[in-house]
């Protein structure tokens, strides 16, 4: 029968560097090993505050499972079979970070704290202690990282914002300077370029946005939601500095609105038409369709000398930024059907009916 060799056990324990950690109750050693006490039958974490054991009764174990296999029970005081407080905090904060990253909108502090069972205040303190930032700062940093990645991959500003979970992009624009160091559009373009003045008004077709560069009117956008029009403009001119209209500018908008209401009178303003050579050809052909008549996509394709390019003609119509001024609403299907319209088929119908009556 094997007898307990007290002297040998004492020598083994004292020679082990882990014994110093146990004597010091060093919490930094928690998790890296456990120790058992032969006389009590329990095992502990190095930091356990229980009465110190005599070294000849101590053995070391790499894991809690190993200590249990050797026949020891977990100490009720330091609960070595459960996560340490530091580990619990780390797990809790990790879960909160994942929740922030996956949420559509940033969870509230209360929502983040709930699974941990801590008060929001306590949770906030623990989160900050573990990560060095507050949950809010973490969420902001995560979102701006996502927006930045998206923009670098070439996504539109609106896409990037919505993908990053900003539920209202106006909120993003408010914080954009802080987050990116400049506005999203100039970030994507790598810097500022031209200035574009714009204003939003109302016409019989709904909201209307008129934008003008140094060269001329560069966008006439129609829609239901003025904010969406402004975002669309920002997306279409990512390099430009957009400036909300001043008083003089309202006159231009009134002029364009007058033209929208009665297209036959024509728009006597310089246009700044930006597009590929092919698009420019299509748009020029569209401007030659008189008010009150229509043309099919394949007719336009023939007129520009590319009879097979019907689909590309349709795409050029869909890319038109100058509603009514470049009358893409006058292009219809071969069978006379209305087909699509960038600004809604209802508006297309209204425009065509109005022009037919004039
Ligand atoms: Zn213990």
Image: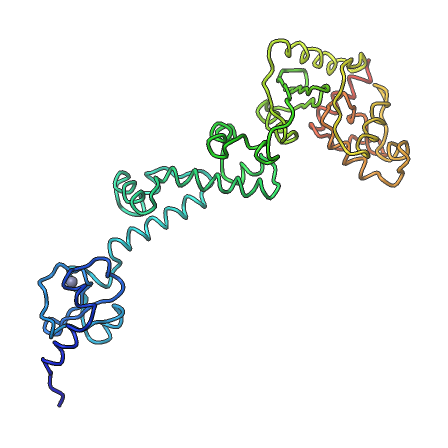
Q: Quadrant of residue 259?
A: top right
Viewer-nearest residue: 270 or 336:
270
Farthest residue, direction bottom: 1
Tally of marks: 0
Side (left or right) of 8 relative to 31: left
Quadrant including the C terminus = top right
Q: How is the image coloured?
A: rainbow
Viewer-nearest residue: 9 or 93:
9
Q: Quadrant of residue 19?
A: bottom left
Side (left or right) of 277 relative to 109: right
Viewer-nearest residue: 134 or 333:
134
Residue drawn 41% across the image and 43% down it = 100
Viewer-nearest residue: 330 or 252:
252
Residue 198 versus residue 138 in the image, above or below = above
**x and y percentages locating residue 90 in the rendered image:** 31, 52
Residue drawn 76% across the image and 13% down it = 262
| Quarter, ligand 1 | bottom left
**x and y percentages locating residue 176 in the rendered image:** 50, 31
Quadrant including the N terminus = bottom left
**x and y percentages locating residue 137 in the rendered image:** 39, 38
**x and y percentages locating residue 224 in the rendered image:** 62, 24
Residue drawn 69% across the image and 27% down it = 343
């Amino acid at each position: 029968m094997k007898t307990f060799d007290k002297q040998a056990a004492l020598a083994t324990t004292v020679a082990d560097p882990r014994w110093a950690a146990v004597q010091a109750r060093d919490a930094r050693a928690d998790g890296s090993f456990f120790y058992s006490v032969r006389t009590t039958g329990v095992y502990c974490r190095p930091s356990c505050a229980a009465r110190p054991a005599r070294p000849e009764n101590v053995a070391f174990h790499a894991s809690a499972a190993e200590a249990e296999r050797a026949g020891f029970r977990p100490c009720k005081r330091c609960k070595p079979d459960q996560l340490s407080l530091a580990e619990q905090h780390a797990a809790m904060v990790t879960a909160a970070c994942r929740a922030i990253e996956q949420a559509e909108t940033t969870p509230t502090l209360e929502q983040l704290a709930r699974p941990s069972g801590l008060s929001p205040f306590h949770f906030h303190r623990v989160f900050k202690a573990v990560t060095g930032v507050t949950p809010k700062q973490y969420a902001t940093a995560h979102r701006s990282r996502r927006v930045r990645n998206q923009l670098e991959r070439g996504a539109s500003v609106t896409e990037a914002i919505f993908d990053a979970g900003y539920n209202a992009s106006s909120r993003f624009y408010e914080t954009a300077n802080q987050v990116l160091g400049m506005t999203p559009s100039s970030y994507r373009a790598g810097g500022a370029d031209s200035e574009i003045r714009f204003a939003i008004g109302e016409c019989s077709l709904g909201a209307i946005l008129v934008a003008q560069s140094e060269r001329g009117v560069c966008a006439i956008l129609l829609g239901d939601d003025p904010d969406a029009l402004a975002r669309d403009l920002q997306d279409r001119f990512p390099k430009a500095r957009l400036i909300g209209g001043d008083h003089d500018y309202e006159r231009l908008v009134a002029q364009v609105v007058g033209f929208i209401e009665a297209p036959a009178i024509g728009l006597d303003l310089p246009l700044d038409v930006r597009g590929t050579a092919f698009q420019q050809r299509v748009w020029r052909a569209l401007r030659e369709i008189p008010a009150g008549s229509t043309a099919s996509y394949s007719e336009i394709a023939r007129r520009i000398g590319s009879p097979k390019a019907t689909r590309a003609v349709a795409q050029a119509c869909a890319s038109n930024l100058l509603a009514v001024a470049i009358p893409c609403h006058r292009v219809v299907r071969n069978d006379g059907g209305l087909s699509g319209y960038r600004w809604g088929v209802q508006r297309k119908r209204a425009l065509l009916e109005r022009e037919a009556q004039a």
